[in-house]
């Protein structure tokens, strides 16, 4: 029996897409052989087992918001859509934990949790589209990671379907757990290369009494960088410290300024009031203007400020650097682009050294060489800042002009060994990840 | 947890001395980082928990007393820092003393070592007259220039065994003829009561000034101070050195010497003696004739700082304008759990600034005669102590034990530092002297310009 | 696996001495004996050598030598672990990291420190304290345990309720892999490139290699701290108060419970100020901004009073606060005053199951004719029932082991875990099937094979037991009581 027929037998004919139905699932110009929408964990397992047997690669797909990340695949294979697995399986407020299926969107999950006074303290961009499983697989995060961390600080249990179609659990449903290896950490940020996340258990927090976002304008980026350092050394406990250059600030509709620092606070009302007032005296010596309130709607747009700066981006890169050098990195990066005649936009979760940059496409025909050269400069800047940088989006010619992922060195070989152990036949999202995994 | 699985476990002993206390150890390891030797070496046989395993294994017959075991048990300072942090209340000091006694029993050593021990424990410590005689001889050695010759000529390196370390630590002995403490120092001002003082063995010879200062300070605080005749060594050095039998004998003699006095307290200004005398009750618990007497005696023993801190110091106190730091002698802070009293006293002295000493409650390496028997480790701990002292910027270290004073002062000399080491009674005594802080520092030799040999020399053949 | 013959040992000793120096190798029988257990004396195993490297190069060289000889090796820190995780279960080398104990670098601007694995946990906080920083994970043994050991077990501590466990504070690791290769996992920045190998390494109980440098986050000390002691006449009231606090939208830094038996032991030890007649007490700590600290404390006090607390008070001074914490953190050792031995259990349950599970624990222990003391991280649902017994009484140890297994089963049944912070080690390897399927364990085994393909690095841990014919060292190994009774087995 051909693979498609087998898949139809597993999930029902309506949930196997082929032909023109596949147009939304084209990956970097390659059309998959089919897309399949399983309705249960068992169906996911059966689908992967069949694909593995047929030697067809499987590309897990949540909301599709990060599908452009990584090396273009040699073969798009079978797209595994997880959107039907969208149940909130369990939420016990007294335990401050919840278990949900991978296909639930972040927005839907948060709405259900908030209705009971709690939330998952993870705020990646595109919450309406991004799914829980996808956010975990891509290790996506947002501004509040400054205080609450990333998926590795919140994910306590995970269920995956492995490359041979087995259902495997790691972690558990309790907030503290050292039994067995920490499989949740293994799957976070693994881009579906080791297993397909089908269910996750996360730690929750009570919704704070109050939350406020304020903006501080600076005449120079380096002054804003000094303000970030002063803020980190102060007694204040912000939940977000985001730094934007002029184009990124403009994308959010902020008043024009060479640099804007968006700072968030949450907690009891008096705590928020006191901190906003204290912030003024922390940033003023560094040349910061008086903090001005920002509309709450801006929260969810902060992380994508650089991406949204240009209608036609030429490339995007994420840099991970030491917090102390974020402003310098942004300044050097923008200068490197200018020297090659290109405009760029920069934003950063500055307190944790997570920097996002976008290059603007100039004109219709885009030469890949100068773009790749700028990206190489940016990568060098990240290395100088103690970190690393990877291309998160770029047209195919650019992606073929420089390594998409940074070099993981000796650790990369260990990653390859892990991949070889856990997915020996290269079934799961092959060839797209760090080190050729 | 115990290893024994027999139905009626016999009490664990080492040649009659109970080490049943090993069963209180639950092997949690919280003591490890507080142990100076473990901290230096990182080897668990040189930690309290590891030594307890060795002692238990010896008592159970699981191991014999090998060279290795002897070495690890001997390296224990008996500083009892582990007792302070032990949540299970393991009586570590008693265990290690039993182990050291066992080592002495099984391994008395060669004739030279035995002779040496005999001179120390049998001759000098038991016979105050002999000790004074020996001191006179040493004074002659110092005064005649022979000491300088030995130190500068390199002859010191030829001395056998641990003798070089002995030599280096030799304090400048005060000239003979200084009056010993009078039998009674009457109270000044309104009389509070009567206390007795232990004048000590080595203490009275080397640090007579401390005794006189102690008596003056007590008197200024309204106490008649008696120094009972017939007292000698309390036996602490014997006990720590594994000479259990002699320690018992000296304890009985000390009790006898003080029993007749009707005093509010027996005040001690040497920490090893104070801690040891407070433990007479346990030491003599097996002796029906002495158990009760020992308990009563022990209950009246007080460290001098502990005793004085019981009430506010009587004024007037003159300013002592200097910066000092306080080093906790092991047998004050760990042996007697006295931590706040000395600091509370120093805080009452006008003009005196007291800065914290990092690891203030760590052993300086003196530890009775440890600096003589284990000069290498003693040297490491001393250098660590000196580094911390110099880091404070203080001009003097205040402490409360002659061993610490000698050791730290010697370490500071070697480091070329002018920082002085004072007994707490000395600084109190200065505050009571009419000149206050302007009085000359009592009983302090000038830092010797003659280069002393580095402390660790001579240890390889020790 | 090769058995070390008597003739081979002196040769190997000389080779090891050439690598780490003569004073860096132990092989005397009495010395090996001292290393036969960690903080859990239920298990004992003798090494052939204890080796003390002082650099990553030495660790790597020793590991390569072990590979050449095909002898097993295991890293050891302070040996305060409570699951037998650092025991040389199959003999071979114990690699002690106690001579690699430096703080190599502190970067206050970026709030990270680079340390060696043998550094005592508390010493890091002491090192950065003068600049207003501290290292957050605070296992109760923090005065002695090492950061390398914390990495192995992913240690927690009272303040993990708010600040997370060790892995949440580790950014990067220099690791000697089981074949001797030196690699960096993660780094100094927050986000890893590729798989989160540092995250996976933490908590792998020494089976993935040996960490030789550790990049950790250091945190600013909070502006204010408030410690509340709530005293209850019934233990169920204390359990209910934990849920009530959470329900009021509060996440304190720590919520610790301590029961009567434990209170009396720590009061005997240090006189910390817990009321001896209380059935249970909650030690609750709030930290953060000074502003509104009172408001939060009032919420806590109200929640405790509503749950039936007979007394609620806040520590009046830093000294009183330290004393209360000293009592809490010394509790395990203090059991030495009321019992010649005890076995610490470490299970986790959903917070809401606390009253039920505590009741079951008491029933199980009573049914075995034993006593239990409870002191645990109530806010996390991380239980520590401590079963007291006298190993010299025939049969008691076996009853303890059986009661412990039943308690673990209860934890598993309510959706919990068999270890919250102590690790699986030797102790709980056979309990793994309580919470993991064969497929789960097979997947973990494959992950282990990627790091440790020859299985030489800390064999016999984490996974359920298998038989082996390897002998231990020259000092005769005495089977434990529970082994002779067939209750547990060594391999």
Image (cartoon, rainbow, N blue to C red):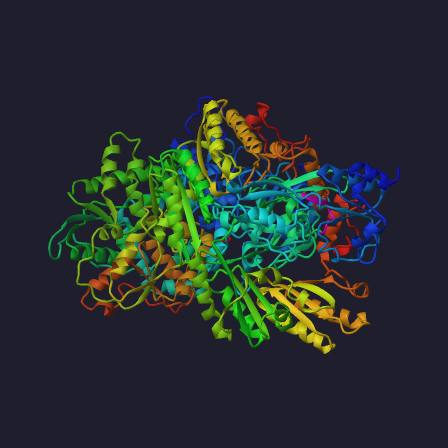
Extreme residue toward the right, this view: A1
Question: x and y percent of residue A209 in the render?
Answer: 47, 54
Report the magenta residues as a range: A191-198
Observer-nearest of A358 and C159? A358
Question: x and y percent of residue C200 in the render?
Answer: 64, 48
In the image, residue A194 lies in the stretch drawn in magenta: yes
Quadrant location of the N terminus of chain A in the rendered image: top right
Observer-nearest of C218 and A320? A320
Q: Which residue corresponds to the image point at 37% horizontal and 46% vertical from the top-left?
A: C301
Locate residue C153 relative to residue C260 in the image: left or right.
Answer: right
Whether residue B225 is visible: yes
Q: Which residue corresponds to the image point at 42% horizontal and 56% vertical from the top-left?
A: B165
Question: x and y percent of residue B86 in the render?
Answer: 41, 42
Main SS, magenta residues: loop
Locate residue A189 relative to residue B97 in the image: left or right.
Answer: right
Locate residue A376 relative to residue B31 in the image: left or right.
Answer: right
Observer-nearest of B84 and C294? C294
Q: Which residue corresponds to the image point at 73% horizontal and 36% vertical from the top-left?
A: A42
Question: x and y percent of residue A389 in the render?
Answer: 69, 63
Residue C263 lies in quadrant: top left
In the image, residue B457 lies in the stretch drawn in magenta: no
Whether residue B115 is visible: no
């Amino acid at each position: 029996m051909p693979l498609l027929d087998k898949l139809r037998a597993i999930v029902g004919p309506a949930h196997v897409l082929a032909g023109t139905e596949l147009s939304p699932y084209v990956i970097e110009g390659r059309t998959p052989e089919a897309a399949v929408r399983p309705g249960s964990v068992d169906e996911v397992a059966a689908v992967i087992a069949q694909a593995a047997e047929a030697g067809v690669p499987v590309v897990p797909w949540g909301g599709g918001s990060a599908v452009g990340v990584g090396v273009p695949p040699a073969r798009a294979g079978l797209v595994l859509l997880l959107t039907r697995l969208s149940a909130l399986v369990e939420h016990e407020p007294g335990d401050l934990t919840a278990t949900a299926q991978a296909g639930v969107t972040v927005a839907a999950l948060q709405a259900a949790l908030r209705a009971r006074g709690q939330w998952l303290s993870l705020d990646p961009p595109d919450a309406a589209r991004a799914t829980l499983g996808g956010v975990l697989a891509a290790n996506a995060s947002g501004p509040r990671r400054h205080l609450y961390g990333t998926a590795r600080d919140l994910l306590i249990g995970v269920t995956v379907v492995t490359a041979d179609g087995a259902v495997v659990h790691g972690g558990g449903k309790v907030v503290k757990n050292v039994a067995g290896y920490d499989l949740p950490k293994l799957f976070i940020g693994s881009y579906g290369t080791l297993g397909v996340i089908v269910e996750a258990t996360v730690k929750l927090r009570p919704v704070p009494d109050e939350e406020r976002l304020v903006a501080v304008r600076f005449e120079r980026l380096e002054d804003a960088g000094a303000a970030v350092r002063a803020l980190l050394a102060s007694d204040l406990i912000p939940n977000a410290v985001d730094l934007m250059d002029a184009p990124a600030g403009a994308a959010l509709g902020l008043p024009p300024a060479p640099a804007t620092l968006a700072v968030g606070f949450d907690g009891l009302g008096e705590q928020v009031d006191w901190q906003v007032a204290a912030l003024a005296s922390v940033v003023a010596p560094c040349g910061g203007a008086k903090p001005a309130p920002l509309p709450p709607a801006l929260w969810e747009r902060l992380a994508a400020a650089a991406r949204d700066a240009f209608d036609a981006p030429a490339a995007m890169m994420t840099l991970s650097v030491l917090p102390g050098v974020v402003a310098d990195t942004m300044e050097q990066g923008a200068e490197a682009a200018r020297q090659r005649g290109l405009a760029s936009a920069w934003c950063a979760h500055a307190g944790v050294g997570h920097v996002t940059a976008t290059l603007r496409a100039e004109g219709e025909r885009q030469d890949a060489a100068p773009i790749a050269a700028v990206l190489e400069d940016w990568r060098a800047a990240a290395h100088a800042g103690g970190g690393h940088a990877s291309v998160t989006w770029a047209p195919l010619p650019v992606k073929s002009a420089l390594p998409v992922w940074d070099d993981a060195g000796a650790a990369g070989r260990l990653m390859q060994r892990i991949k070889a152990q856990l997915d020996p036949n290269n079934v799961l999202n092959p060839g797209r990840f760090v080190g050729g995994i | 947890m115990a290893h024994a699985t027999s139905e009626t476990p016999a009490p664990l002993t080492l040649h009659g001395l109970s080490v049943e206390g090993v069963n209180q150890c639950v092997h949690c390891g919280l003591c490890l980082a507080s142990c100076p030797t473990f901290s230096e070496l990182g080897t668990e046989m040189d930690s309290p928990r590891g030594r307890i395993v060795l002692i238990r294994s010896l008592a159970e017959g699981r191991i014999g007393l090998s060279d290795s075991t002897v070495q690890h048990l001997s390296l224990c300072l008996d500083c009892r820092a582990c007792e302070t942090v032990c949540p299970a209340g393991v009586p570590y000091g008693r265990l290690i003393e039993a182990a050291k006694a066992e080592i002495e029993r099984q391994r008395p050593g060669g004739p030279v070592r035995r002779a040496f021990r005999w001179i120390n424990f049998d001759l000098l410590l038991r016979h105050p007259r002999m000790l004074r005689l020996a001191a006179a001889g040493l004074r002659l050695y110092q005064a005649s220039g022979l000491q300088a010759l030995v130190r500068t000529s390199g002859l010191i390196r030829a001395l056998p065994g641990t003798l070089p370390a002995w030599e280096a630590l030799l304090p400048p002995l005060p000239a003979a003829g200084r009056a010993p403490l009078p039998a009674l120092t009457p109270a000044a001002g309104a009389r509070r009561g009567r206390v007795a003082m232990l004048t000590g063995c080595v203490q009275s010879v080397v640090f007579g000034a401390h005794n006189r200062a102690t008596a003056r300070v007590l008197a200024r605080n309204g106490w008649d101070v008696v120094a009972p005749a017939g007292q000698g060594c309390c036996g602490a050095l014997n006990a720590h050195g594994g000479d259990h039998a002699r320690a018992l004998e000296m304890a009985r003699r000390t009790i006898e010497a003080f029993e007749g006095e009707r005093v509010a307290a027996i005040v001690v200004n040497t920490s090893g003696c104070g801690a040891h005398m407070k433990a007479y009750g346990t030491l003599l618990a097996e002796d029906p004739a002495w158990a009760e007497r020992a308990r009563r005696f022990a209950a009246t023993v007080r460290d001098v700082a502990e005793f004085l801190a019981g009430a506010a110091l009587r004024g007037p106190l003159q300013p002592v304008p200097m910066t000092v730091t306080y080093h906790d002698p092991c047998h004050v802070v760990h042996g007697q759990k006295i931590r706040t009293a000395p600091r509370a006293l120093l805080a009452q002295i006008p003009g005196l600034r007291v800065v914290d000493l990092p690891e203030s409650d760590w052993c300086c390496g003196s530890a009775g005669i440890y600096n003589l028997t284990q000069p290498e480790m003693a040297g490491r701990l001393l250098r660590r102590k000196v580094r911390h002292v110099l880091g404070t910027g203080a001009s003097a270290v205040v402490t409360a034990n002659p061993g610490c004073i000698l050791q730290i002062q010697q370490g500071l000399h070697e480091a070329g530092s002018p920082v002085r080491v004072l007994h707490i009674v000395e600084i109190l005594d200065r505050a009571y002297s009419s000149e206050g802080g302007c009085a000359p520092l009592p009983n302090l030799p000038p830092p010797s310009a003659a280069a002393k040999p580095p402390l660790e020399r001579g240890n390889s053949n020790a | 696996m090769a058995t070390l013959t008597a003739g081979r040992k002196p040769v190997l000793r000389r080779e090891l001495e050439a690598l780490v120096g003569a004073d860096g190798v132990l092989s005397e029988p009495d010395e090996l004996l001292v290393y036969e257990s960690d903080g859990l004396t239920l298990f004992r195993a003798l090494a052939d050598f204890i080796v003390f490297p002082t650099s990553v190069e030495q660790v790597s060289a020793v590991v390569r030598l072990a590979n050449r000889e095909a002898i097993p090796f295991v890293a050891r820190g302070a040996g305060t672990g409570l699951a037998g995780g650092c025991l040389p279960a199959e003999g071979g080398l114990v690699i002690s990291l106690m001579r690699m104990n430096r703080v190599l670098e502190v970067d206050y601007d970026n709030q990270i420190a680079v340390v060696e694995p043998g550094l005592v946990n508390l010493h890091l906080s002491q090192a950065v304290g003068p600049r207003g920083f501290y290292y957050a994970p605070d296992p109760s043994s923090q005065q002695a345990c090492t950061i390398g050991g914390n990495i192995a077990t992913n240690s927690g501590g009272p303040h993990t309720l708010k600040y997370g466990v060790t892995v949440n504070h580790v950014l990067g690791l220099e690791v000697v892999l089981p074949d001797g290769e030196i690699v960096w996992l993660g780094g100094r920045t927050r986000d890893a490139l590729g798989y989160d190998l540092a995250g996976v390494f933490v908590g792998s109980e020494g089976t993935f290699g040996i960490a030789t440098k550790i990049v950790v986050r250091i945190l600013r000390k909070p502006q204010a701290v408030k410690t509340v002691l709530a005293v209850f006449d019934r233990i169920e009231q204390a359990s209910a108060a934990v849920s009530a606090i959470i329900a009021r939208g509060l996440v304190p830094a720590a919520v610790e419970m301590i029961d009567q038996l434990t209170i009396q032991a720590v009061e005997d030890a240090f006189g910390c100020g817990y009321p001896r007649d209380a059935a249970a007490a909650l030690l609750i700590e709030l930290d953060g901004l000074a502003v509104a600290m009172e408001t939060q404390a009032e919420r806590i006090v109200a929640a405790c009073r509503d749950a039936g607390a007979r007394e609620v008070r806040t520590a009046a001074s830093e000294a009183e606060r330290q004393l209360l914490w000293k009592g809490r953190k010394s509790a395990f050792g203090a059991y030495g005053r009321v019992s010649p031995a005890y076995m610490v259990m470490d299970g986790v349950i959903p917070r809401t199951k606390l009253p039920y599970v505590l009741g079951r624990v008491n029933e199980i222990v009573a049914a075995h004719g034993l006593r239990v003391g409870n002191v645990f991280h109530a806010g996390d649902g991380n239980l520590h029932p401590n079963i007291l017994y006298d190993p010299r009484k025939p049969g008691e140890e076996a009853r303890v082991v059986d009661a412990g297994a039943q308690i673990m089963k209860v934890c598993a049944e309510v959706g919990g875990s068999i270890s919250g912070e102590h690790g699986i080690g030797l102790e709980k390897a056979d309990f793994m099937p309580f919470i993991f399927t064969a497929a789960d364990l097979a997947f973990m085994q494959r992950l282990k094979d990627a790091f440790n393909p020859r299985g030489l690095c800390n064999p016999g841990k984490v996974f359920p037991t298998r038989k082996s014919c390897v002998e231990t060292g020259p000092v005769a190994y005495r089977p434990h009581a529970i082994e002779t009774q067939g209750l547990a087995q060594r391999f």
